[in-house]
Image (spheres, grey):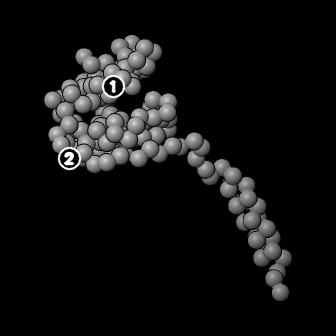
Amino acid sequence: MLSNKTIMGIVLMSSAVLFLLPGCYKDKTVILDSGPAITRTVTFSNDIIPIFNKSCSLSGCHTTGGKAPDLSAANAYNSLKIGNYLNTGNPEGSQLYLWLTGKKSTQMPPGGLNKDYNALVLAWIKQGANNN
């Protein structure tokens, strides 16, 4: 037979679990696949800037005077390097990549980039995130 102290302990533990359990979830994280691996050299000027021009450096978004980082063609590289958005030692952990794939707080842009764009950005970071 269980003692009153044991029963009270079980009741308290059960209550604590029921109280804390609803707070243990993450809301609205969308993880987009990176797409196929890129094996060719990815260049900043020919591959990454066109992605930013089409999807990021739009009016009211990541432009000069807009939201950081400034991804306009003239400022994108310095904004990413100075702002520590790139991590060539851990490309999948780069802030830029985490945002694009929806693995960090909010997805950029709303709706996310397509898999091919994500794969290009990841390949560019893996290749050293050069200003080429």
Frontmost residue, 121 versus 20: 121
Residue 51 position (above or below residue 129) = above
In the image, residue 121 lies at what x, y percent?
A: 30, 37
The residue type indicated by label 2 comes to Thr
Q: Give me the residue at 73% from left, 59% from top.
A: 18
Q: Quadrant of residue 21?
A: bottom right
Question: In what quadrant of the picture does the C terminus appear?
Answer: top left
Q: Which residue is label 2 attached to?
A: 39
Residue at image coords 76%, 70%: 9
Q: Is residue 81 visible?
A: no
On the image, the x and y values in percent for residue 23 come to 66, 49
As measured in the structure, the alpha-carbon distance from the residue carrying label 1 to the one carrying label 2 is 21 Å
87 above or below 77?
A: below
**What's under tag 1, amino acid-wise?**
Phe
Q: Are marks 1 and 2 in contact (CB under 8 Å)?
A: no
Identify residue for label 1: 52
- Asked whether, in this view, residue 100 is left or right of residue 38, the answer is right
Compared with residue 49, is residue 120 higher up or lower down, i.e. above or below?
Answer: below
Question: Farthest bottom residue?
Answer: 1
Q: Secondary structure at mark 1?
A: helix
Q: Residue at x 47, y 45 (%)?
A: 31
Classify mark 2: helix, strand or loop: loop
Task: Give the camera-side residue of 109 and 75.
Answer: 109
The disc label shown at residue 10, or none: none
Q: Quadrant of residue 76?
A: top left
